């Protein structure tokens, strides 16, 4: 059997000032979309940053197609893993097209200029997130949702094997939430992998085939979405009573007031 | 990359025009024809002396210094991810000034004063870097604040030295502090550093573009962030120290030139860095021409001119950026 695209072996995320959480042992295979659920501050972003190789794990290891990540050059990791951050820094003026184009960075040598194909890749990515026609707009003039879609376009331009998306549906209206998740699922059905942190349990239920639940106590459990979507487990996860309904044969969870 | 070629052609033309103007203007004004005759190897003996021995070396020193300051500013702005950063922001000019004034107080010659200024600049760089690096966290804010405080310390030391210096030494010291090109001697170190840095920065340009998006994003796109930041820091410090050594501390060139260019040309460092070198050179060449002619036969320190131009531009940009 082929190695998973991204494999966590006894991985303990390093969250400063907190005791070790449960070691994570899971593999993200081609064609798998993993959702990470958990309350605020539980370390979902820190987990994604660790998986992207941006911060060291406290224990355990991370393998890309079977190779330990610390043995790979930074550039090669960037071709394999594409990360969409929750926060973005835009200190300097830049256009939408320039921003999408930086996704080609890991593929270009120092002296090399972006080729026509690189531009075409960036244009195609912008088209997929409905930003065609806005190529020359300064990013400072974009709305929150447009910036979020632009960040996803940059990741699409990067064309990685595994997408790591930190709350990709943040700032998006209902239509664009579904659209972004459709794009992610499209990439996954083409044989990529994806890990996304989310707050919307129902969207996670609909789009993710696997879930990782992270509890404030440091415990974690993971498995197929079908096995994980247990109302009791979700209520414990968020310390929040839930009502469960059904739409199109899928469970739907609603938070209950006091 | 026709856009880069187009921009550089315009700026090169501007550079030539600025240099021609600078060597033609002065106590004995020369016509363009006379200037051209000298520069192409002919002309009258008096004009030859005037241009080749007096005006041209000073003009070339001004050009290189302006270019160095603008490139250092552009690099610092990316490093600190602050479009309003300045090459002196890390206390470099203060350290250089203390070095230069100490040498002047000791009555040493101009070469020693320059060397002492360079050493002072590098010491200041090391102090700021060491302190900001301290416990391992290395944020732009921390670096910036450390630089500001260290600069204030140097400022106090400079005031102290001025207060205890003999009166006859004061004019020279004040001129040095305000930035002055009349003592610029050898132009080769500045030109060598300028050409080398611009050539070396070109292959780093795209990495710098990515770094401007923040260190995490840059790392996620395959940039080795920490080594790149160290490289920028060391290169910008060396470049600024070279400029300070040639001409004392000349304010605002490193701040205003890259910033204005970014407004017009966008933020591609592969364009901004060479364009900064040329535009900074043009600005300082013209400012120095003004400085030595505006109240001739007296000369103004060129730093006065750049500050007079730079302060309103800076305030305008700051106001606009809100």
Image: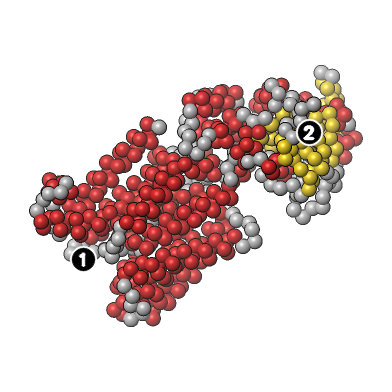
Which mark, by number, is residue B298?
1
Give the CA distance from mark 2 to mark 1: 77 Å
Q: Quadrant of the N terminus of chain B?
A: top left
Left or right: B112 with respect to A229?
left
Q: Can you name the residue that lies furthest to the right here?
A: A232
Q: Which residue is mark 2?
A: A27
Q: Nearer the viewer, residue A156 or B206?
A: B206
- In which chain is the residue bearing label 1? B
Say which quarter of the image contains residue A236. Answer: top right
Rendered location of residue B140, percent (x, y)? 56, 54
Q: How is the image coloured?
A: secondary structure
Report the mark closest to the observer, 2 or 1. Answer: 2
Say which quarter of the image contains residue B16. Answer: top left
Rendered location of residue B229, percent (x, y)? 54, 51
Left or right: B22 with respect to B175?
left
Secondary element at tag 2: strand
Q: Is residue B256 visible?
A: no
- In which chain is the residue bearing label 2? A
Residue at 79%, 53% (x, y): give it.
Answer: A18
Rendered location of residue A197, percent (x, y)? 73, 36
Give the number of callouts: 2
Which mark, by number, is residue B130?
none
Residue at 84%, 28% (x, y): give it.
Answer: A224
Q: Can you name the residue that lies furthest to the top here?
A: A248
Secondary element at tag 1: loop
Residue at 58%, 61% (x, y): give it.
Answer: B132
Q: Nearer the viewer, residue B112 or B155?
A: B112
* Co-location on one chain, circles 2 and 1: no
Q: Nearer the viewer, residue B181 or A206?
A: B181
Q: Is residue B166 visible?
A: yes
């Amino acid at each position: 059997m082929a190695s998973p695209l991204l494999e966590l072996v006894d991985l303990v995320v390093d969250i400063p000032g907190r005791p070790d959480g449960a070691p994570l042992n899971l593999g993200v295979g081609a064609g798998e979309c993993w959702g990470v659920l958990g309350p605020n501050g539980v370390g979902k972003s820190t987990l994604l940053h660790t998986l992207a190789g941006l911060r060291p794990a406290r224990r355990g290891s991370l393998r890309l197609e079977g190779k330990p990540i610390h043995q790979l050059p930074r550039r090669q990791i960037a071709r394999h893993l594409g990360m969409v951050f929750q926060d973005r820094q835009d200190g300097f003026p830049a256009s939408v097209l320039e921003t999408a184009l930086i996704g080609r960075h890991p593929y270009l040598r120092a002296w090399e200029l972006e080729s026509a194909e690189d531009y075409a890749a960036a244009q195609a990515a912008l088209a997929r997130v409905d930003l065609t026609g806005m190529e020359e707009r300064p990013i400072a003039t974009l709305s929150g949702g447009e910036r979020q879609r632009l960040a996803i376009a940059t990741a699409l331009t990067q064309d990685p094997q595994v997408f790591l998306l930190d709350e990709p549906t943040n700032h998006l209206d209902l239509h664009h939430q579904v659209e972004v998740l459709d794009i992610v699922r499209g990439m996954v059905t083409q044989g990529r992998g994806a890990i996304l942190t989310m707050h919307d349990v129902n969207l996670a239920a609909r789009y993710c085939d696997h879930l990782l639940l992270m509890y404030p106590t440091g415990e974690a459990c993971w498995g197929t979405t079908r096995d994980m979507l247990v109302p009791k487990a979700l209520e414990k996860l968020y310390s929040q009573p839930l009502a469960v309904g059904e739409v199109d044969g899928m469970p739907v969870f609603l938070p209950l007031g006091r | 990359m026709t856009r880069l070629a187009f921009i550089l052609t315009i700026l090169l033309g501007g550079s030539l025009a600025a240099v021609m103007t600078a060597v033609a203007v002065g106590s004995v004004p020369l016509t363009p024809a006379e200037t051209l005759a000298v520069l192409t190897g002919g002309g009258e003996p008096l004009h030859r002396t005037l241009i080749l021995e007096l005006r041209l070396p000073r003009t070339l020193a001004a050009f290189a210094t302006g270019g160095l300051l603008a490139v250092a500013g552009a690099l610092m702005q990316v490093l600190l991810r602050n479009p309003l950063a300045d090459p002196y922001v890390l206390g470099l000019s203060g350290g250089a000034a203390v070095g230069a004034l100490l040498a002047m107080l000791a009555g040493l010659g101009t070469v020693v004063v320059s060397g002492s200024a360079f050493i002072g600049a590098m010491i200041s760089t090391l102090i700021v870097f060491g302190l900001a690096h301290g416990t391992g966290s290395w944020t732009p804010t921390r670096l910036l604040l450390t630089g500001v405080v260290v600069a204030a310390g140097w400022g106090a030391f400079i005031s102290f030295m001025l207060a205890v210096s003999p009166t006859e030494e004061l004019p020279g010291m004040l001129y040095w502090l305000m930035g002055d090109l009349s003592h610029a001697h050898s132009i080769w170190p500045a030109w060598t550093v300028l050409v080398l840095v611009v050539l070396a920065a070109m292959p780093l340009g795209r990495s710098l573009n990515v770094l401007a998006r923040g260190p995490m994003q840059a790392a996620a796109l395959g940039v080795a962030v920490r080594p790149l930041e160290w490289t920028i820091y060391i290169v910008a410090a060396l470049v600024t120290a070279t400029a300070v050594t040639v001409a004392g501390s000349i304010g605002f060139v490193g701040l205003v030139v890259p910033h204005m260019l970014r407004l017009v040309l966008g933020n591609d460092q592969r364009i901004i860095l060479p364009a900064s070198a040329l535009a900074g050179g043009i600005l300082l060449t013209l400012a120095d021409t003004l400085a030595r002619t505006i109240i001739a036969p007296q000369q103004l320190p060129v730093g006065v001119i750049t500050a007079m131009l730079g302060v309103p531009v800076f305030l305008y940009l700051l106001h606009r950026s809100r």
